[in-house]
Structures are given as structure tokens and as C-alpha cells.
Image: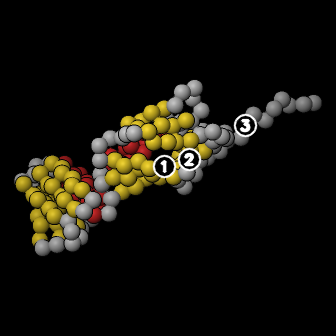
Amino acid sequence: MSRIGRRPIALPAKVEIQIDGQHIAVKGPKGQLSRSLPPLITVQQNAQMLTVSRLNDSRPARQLHGLCRTLVANMVDGVSKGFERRLELVGVGYRAAIQGSKLVLNVGYSHPVEIPFPPGIQIAVEGNNIIVVSGTDKELVGNTAARIRAVRPPEPYKGKGIRYLGEQVRRKAGKSGKAKK
């Protein structure tokens, strides 16, 4: 049995769960999320605990068991605490700003790059070079942060670009120059 899948999910006090067959909806202080689960997986609520189980021990059911438990746990965490990813801009003249519902990045291109916010995501800029992506859906927060990072990923020679806060960029040595006799 899946070690992750069999762990129960504790429900915080202000989180409400609605289970309609294979559809689960989670509502909390930060918002609400819903997801449809595969037919091989079932979710039961016992007091302040959720238990995710599988119908049989077939290979697809075993594969989905831990995944679905983690997805439901992330939904519960998202509506109660929320998720956040921080990115930093490294480079001379690199800066970020928010204009309306778009993030505007000046990252060394001849034009500013505009990225619209997806619904359910909040983006804030601290200073000129720290971008904070937050929301209730962990998958959407991670994808949005990855899309922002993909505009100018960190390069290995000078380390310039957009990176996750605390990310280590492996640096390469540049040209060593012409060998002299």
C-alpha cells in the first residue's frame, strides 16, 4: 500500500469539504478549490480527518493513490494557508513592475515583457527585483512562477536572469584566452 496514500489528512478548523462522488470541493478562509478525482480513488471524511483510499490493488490504482492524496492535501493547505513562490531578478537594469493586471519585466530585451496574471494568482513586487507569486492552488502558483522564470532563465557565465529566491546557479568559466608561447 502507498505510504503517502494511507496517511490521513487533518482538516483545519475553518476548512469545509464537500464530496460528491468523484468531485471534491474545499472551501476555506483563503478561497475555494475543486477537483475531480479518478474513478479508482475514493475520499471519505471522518470528523476532522480525510482518508483517501483506492478501490482495488491494480497498478493504475496504486499509481494514483499517493498522487490523489497529495493533491487533496495541497488543496486543504492552499485554502487554509496559501502557497507562495519568490523570484529574484539578477542583472544590471533588470527590474519588475506591476501595471494594472500585468507584470512588466525589463530584463535586457529591447522591449519590456508583459505577463498577464492568471485568475486566482496574486503577484507583488518587493523593491525592483523580488517578485512574489502567491495563491491557493499550488500547481497554478508553480506554473506561473515557472512561466515568469522562463522569460530570462539564469545564464551560467554571469548568473544574470530570473531565478527562484535561493536557487544556486552553477557557474561556468569563460574563455581562457589565447595560449601564449
On the image, numbered disc 1 is attached to which residue? 125
Give the camera-side residue of 113 and 38: 113
Query: Residue 1, how many percent across, how many down?
Result: 21, 63
- Callout 3: 10 Å neighbours few (<14), some, many (20+)? few
What is the distance, in whole Å, between disc 2 and disc 3 at their CAs?
29 Å
The answer to whether residue 2 is seen in the rendering is no
Q: Secondary structure at mark 2?
A: loop
Q: Are marks 1 and 3 in contact (CB under 8 Å)?
A: no
Q: Amino acid under label 1? A: Val
Mark 2 lies on residue: 128
Verify CB contact (< 8 Å) between mark 2 and mark 1: yes
Residue at image point 38% right, 43% down: 144
Left or right: residue 52 compared with residue 167: left
Residue 22 drawn at (x, y percent): 10, 51
Give, as a three-letter code, the residue at label 3: Gly
The quarter of the picture where the C terminus appears is: top right
